[in-house]
Amino acid sequence: MPVSARYSANQLPMLQLAEASQAVQKREVSPLDLTGACLAEIERRNPELNAFITVTAESALEQARRAEAEIVRGEWKGPLHGIPVAIKDLVETAGVRTTAGSAVLKDNVPAADAEVVRRLKAAGAVLLGKLNLHEFAYGASGIIGHFGPARNPWNTAHVAGGSSSGSASAVAAGLCYGAIGTDTAGSIRLPAACCGITGLKPTYGLVSKRGVIPLSWSFDHVGPMARTSADAAIMLQAIAYYDPQDIYCQRFPPVFYPSAIEEHTSALRLGIARDFWNDVDEEIGQAVDAAVAVLISLVANVRDVGLSLDTDRTLVGAESYAHHQASLLQHENDYHPETLRRVRSGAHVTTLQYIQAHQDLLRQRRDILQLFEQVDVLVTPTTAILLPALADLQAQPDLLRSRELQMLRNTQPFNMLGLPCASVCCGFSRDGLPIGMQIAGAPGADGVVLCLAHAYQKQTGWHAKHPPRGN
């Protein structure tokens, strides 16, 4: 049954966020139309995908009604007004449980919103609920968690990537138009690559982490996950503000990201970090090589650059243990055994080791600035291996650990460096599973990263493909 003269109810969930936003602004569809379509899709697909832990249907419909009334009165707040999005269940939401995917927090209902949620609400977004994740965000596969694994909508036998597994699955499957993820070693970009969407890990400190359950304060980032770089830019615009109450937040010159992505790329200098191609699956290497050929046609010049594949886990281990130490005394049996093993591994980090690792982190974040005197953007494959099957990882704990390390190998160095870094879909394997390419930039150059990603997506059609929608 038609919702408007232009879109049917069946078409609405698969619109890009920017398309849905324009349709709302032009009064071609209403926020209620979009919200109802997403809730119907959640009801139909979530039992199979397990992307949502909590669906807040009643409050979402109320928010949609309010947004519709505001827009009718001429009180349009911007491109997120009336757009249904969802939140990783690591991010605190007032009056709505925030579980971190763990039995430890299965009944946890925060009293206040995280700053990123507050900003989304101020932008008029409609919040559909909370998204599944790898328990406490401590894993790359997304298969460990109290509520079961989120599944990949391209093939539900495969992982959706982690830790923001539900965020990527929900966006790719059309259950929401955008989502908030977090990224400590690749947890936005990896699931974005696995599910064929766009995910941005912003510059360290650009987006407030206040009210987000930490994994590692030195590496945690909060960022947007959406179908396109244009959609990610709209979301980033709403959440990228200095928060004086977050000691990790930094001031950056203001950028209007939806305009920044339309800048010309012809003057950009592209760096190819060839070490990130070592031991990459042949299908991934071929897809990213083809994508690089497109990028070369869009920029001024290209050069190979050296970039360390530093994957030291000292700080992550120590900081995760520091956060969980008190909880372990009361809720040890509520942690998944593998999560418990990972958390406890940080107990052995000495004070000297921590100080040395933190000094090394600061040194690397300063030294990387020299590279950006030679190039403006860097490109690598997002992952080194094709998507593992859920059953294989669930059956073999040792395989799970080794595969997760392989999956994070190319993403984790950018958390160490604190650089803005996006993953965009650049092709599919012979089995029909998405392949991702990473684009990174200098600190604060999030707009440049999204700009090149946007230029690439205008030249290609990978981002416009949709997974099967089921029955």
Image: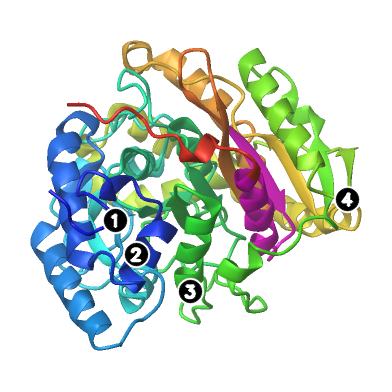
Q: Are marks 4 and 1 in contact (CB under 8 Å)?
A: no
Q: Are marks 2 and 1 in contact (CB under 8 Å)?
A: yes
Q: Is residue 402 magenta?
A: no
Q: Please name the amino acid that badge 3 sits on.
A: Asp
C-alpha separation, residue under disc 3 versus residue under disc 2: 36 Å
Q: Which mark is residue 23?
A: 2
Residue lying at the far front of the rendered structure = 5
Q: Select label 3 or label 1 by which is in front.
A: 1
Q: Which mark is residue 300?
A: 4
Q: Select label 4 or label 1 by which is in front.
A: 1
Q: Which mark is residue 309?
A: none
Q: Please name the amino acid that badge 2 sits on.
A: Ala
Q: In this figure, which residue is indicated by the disc labeled 1?
A: 6
Q: In this figure, which residue is indicated by the disc labeled 3?
A: 246
Q: Select label 4 or label 2 by which is in front.
A: 2
Residue lying at the far left of the rendered structure = 58
| Sooner in the amino-acid sequence: mark 2 or mark 1 | 1
Magenta residues span 436-458
| Sooner in the amino-acid sequence: mark 4 or mark 2 | 2
Q: Please name the amino acid that badge 1 sits on.
A: Arg
